[in-house]
Structure formats: C-alpha cells, structure tokens
Amino acid sequence: MAKVKTTYVCSECGYETPRWLGKCPDCGSWNTLIEQEAAPALRNEEKKLKRAPGADAEVLRVDAIPDQAMERRSSGIAELDRVLGGGVVDGSLVLVGGDPGVGKSTLLTQLCANMARSGTSVLYVSGEESARQVKMRARRLGADDSGFYVLSENDMNTVEKRMQELSPAVMVVDSIQTMYRPDMASAPGSVSQVRECASQLMRLAKLSGCSVFLVGHVTKEGAIAGPRILEHMVDAVLYFEGDRQHQYRLLRAVKNRFGSVNELGMFEMSERGMIEVENASEALLSERAHDASGAVVMCAMEGSRPLLTDVQALVSTTVFGNPRRMASGVDQGRLALLLAVLEKRVGLRLYDQDVYINIAGGMSLTEPAADLALCAAVASSNKNRAIGGDWAVMGEVGLAGEVRAISQAERRISECARLGFNNVIVPKFNLRNLRVPEHVRLIGVETVSQALGELGLFRRDS
C-alpha cells in the first residue's frame, strides 16, 4: 500500500511545508501549522482543464476603461445598509463574522426575506442546517412566505450548478467553513478548503454580478476562523458584536471597498429577530443613573453617526499591594495615561485607589475625544460628587493636562442638545465659528483642571 503523503499548512496565512515547525516562517505565528493530506499530483489533461480564470484578459489603459455606475440594492434593513455604505453592491463578496449565537443567521435570513419580497431572486445556501431548520427559523421571523430559495448543501460543485440554474441576484452561504470541494483531499474547514471555496465563490460573484454573503465562524480570540487570506479576498468584512446575555447587537465594518469602515449599525435581539435601533443614543442612555457619582455623558462619532454614551468610573481604596486598573470599552494603556495626568497635573491621589471603567451598553470608545469624559468620571467617583444630569463632556487630553480640539464638534453638540444635555464642555479651540442651538450653554476649556472646576470637582483648596 502506498504511503499517504502529508503536508503542514499554516492556519493563519496558508504557508505550506513538508515538515512540522513550531513557528510559521511566513507570518511568524506560533503553533499554527496543521497536518493534512497532500493533494495528488494532477495529470497533464487535468492541468489543462484547471486553467486560472481570467488568463486571457486584455491590458487596458486606465482612461480607456469604461465607467459604470456602482449599482446598489436596498437590503430592507437600514442599519445594515448604513454599514455597507448605502446598500448591497452587485457582484460584491461580503464576509459576516461573529460569535456563535450572536444572530448572524437571523440577520441574513431577514435580509433574504426583505429582498425576496421586493422581487429580487435570493438563494440561501445552508451547509450546517437542513432546509426544514431554515424554514423553522424563517417562520419564527415571519419570513416563511417571502419566497426566497433554500439549498441545504456543502458541495461547492452542486452549489455552483444550482446557482447557474437559478441565477440569483443575492446569495447567502452559511457558513464558508462547512463548504468543500470534492476534488481536494482535505476535510471541510481546513485552510486549503476555505481558501479554494472562497476563491470559487469570488469568481462566481464577479462573473455573474450576484452579491454573495459569507457567514464566517470566529476563533476564541475573536478572529475569523481559517486563513487570513480569506479577509483579503472579500470586498467587505462585517463583525457582529454583542453578548448573548444582553439585548443589543453592534454591526461594524472592519473592511469595506465600497464605503466607510467607521459606520456602526445597532440592533436589538428579540423573538421576532433583529430590530433596528433608530435612536441609538436614547437607547444607550435609557437606564442611566442620574444622581450617581462617577458617571458622565459624552458624544462619540461612529462614522457619520453621533452616539451619546454613558462613561462610568468607580474609584475605591485598594486592599492590595498594587492598585487594580480595569477597563471595559476603553484601552487599558490609555486609561493608565489619563490617570497619570490626573495625579501629576490635577493632584488627585490615585496611587492607592482601585479604578474601574465601564462604557455602558457594550460600546467601545477608541477616539481621543473620550479622554476628558474619562477624567471627569474618575474625578467624580474619587470626590464622590455627582455630575449634573444635563451635562456632557468631550475633549482630547494631552500629557501636559491641556484639552485639545476634537472633530465634528457641531454634530456632537447638536446630538447632545436633541436629548436635553444643555451644558456641554468642549475644547476652547472648537468654539470658533460654531453654530449651536440657543438653549445650549457651551463652556470652552483649555486644561483638565479648568474642566473639573466647571463641574465642581476640583478646587485649589480641595
């Protein structure tokens, strides 16, 4: 019996080697080489049949390439259209990732139903569930009468054949890790299978103009399972975030060739599926404690969308040798920097205090405009003095304790005014040529000490 040849493939980058290595020579990742059976050598006749698509393409000058308007279709879900940049682009390949149970299949089933009701031909390919299971989910969502097609299959050759017969305008593949090509010896979910199946779907999308959505599993670190090249091949990568114990889900784009990557979509999980949260600021602040110390409101920008978020801090005397610093929703290193500024420039004694930071609603603040709100929340908890319920604070803080200007200040202030926050502290530099509602009182500050003084949290004799 002939000996089966094996090869080792890196699960991160797809690098192949005949022997096992602890560290991948290509991407530098450790313990990512997986053993799999090597594909048999192809005969000359087979090699001729497997020519790369596009081998006979012509060379064109860039000014001679015909202009074609980018066609978009509405998905019927405004929050999803926002994240995609205005709608579903014809011939696009979109990867949707997220933790198990977060609602990926639910959202895409609703997308299929909405587009099918508008007269679009839609095919839902399920490699994990039977057609009956898909029907049960569609009935729960009230979409069993929408008329989209369901194919329970994970053989890519069969999927391609049915796609050519039906010629759908939109296709969903749930999930890419379950699909396989029979002519390859490796098992479904392996690096080579995921790479080749995604390549085949990309070719089908570009040639037919069909918009393809791929569902991707994630690893325990939160990255898309499979080779990293999968994210490079697709046109857009969307991550569905949210704790299964909480009702809100956030949809973010980390890559988008047809729009901005800064947009955010917000949904509420219910028995009827994903419900769009149109007034996200009001939803995030609905359970805010008005008279509690350590809480302050700031307005964050997620792409073109202003969102009011509740920044919470808890400062208490430590019982450990080293005080604890824990942050949820903000960078731990940024928190350490701001605490050092408060100690050095403001004079707050935090070296023997535990500091805990939380951004309510599962939000993540990455922009520097949240710095001043974090400082105000920490000072409020440290002094045990509550900040007024109609105050909003925003600004970037430097190492010298200065408050620097922020972007899109007018849109942030208008959102604060819309929800009743009439006292807004902003960097003094942003007051130039600023148009704001008449009932809003703007306070321009140059330093952290000045901002805390306006809030009644800092005095020279305190």
Image (cartoon, grey):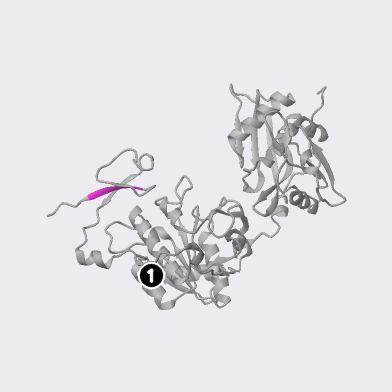
Please provide percent x and percent y for residue 120. 53, 76
Q: Nearer the viewer, residue 183 or 175?
A: 183
Per the rendered image, the range of residues in magenta is 6-10
Can you say whether 305 is above or below 114 in the image? above
- Drawn side of residue 272 relative to residue 377, left or right: left
Q: Residue at x 58, y 58 (%)?
A: 259
Image point (57%, 50%), residue name: 243
Is residue 160 in the magenta section?
A: no
Q: How many marks?
A: 1
SS class of the residue under badge 1?
A: helix
Tell me, yes or no, if residue 389 can be seen here. no
Residue 381 occupies quadrant: top right
Badge 1 is on which residue? 159
- Pinpoint residue 455: horizontal percent, then vertical percent: 81, 35
| 278 or 197, nearer to the observer | 197
Q: Nearer the viewer, residue 451 or 285?
A: 451
- Residue type (three-letter) at the residue carrying disc 1: Val
Does the magenta stretch mainly form a helix, a strand or a loop? Answer: strand
Residue 311, image x, y percentages: 69, 41
Residue 343: which quarter of the image? top right
Residue at image location 59% in from the left, 55% down from the top = 260
- Vertical placement of residue 150 versus 446, above or below: below
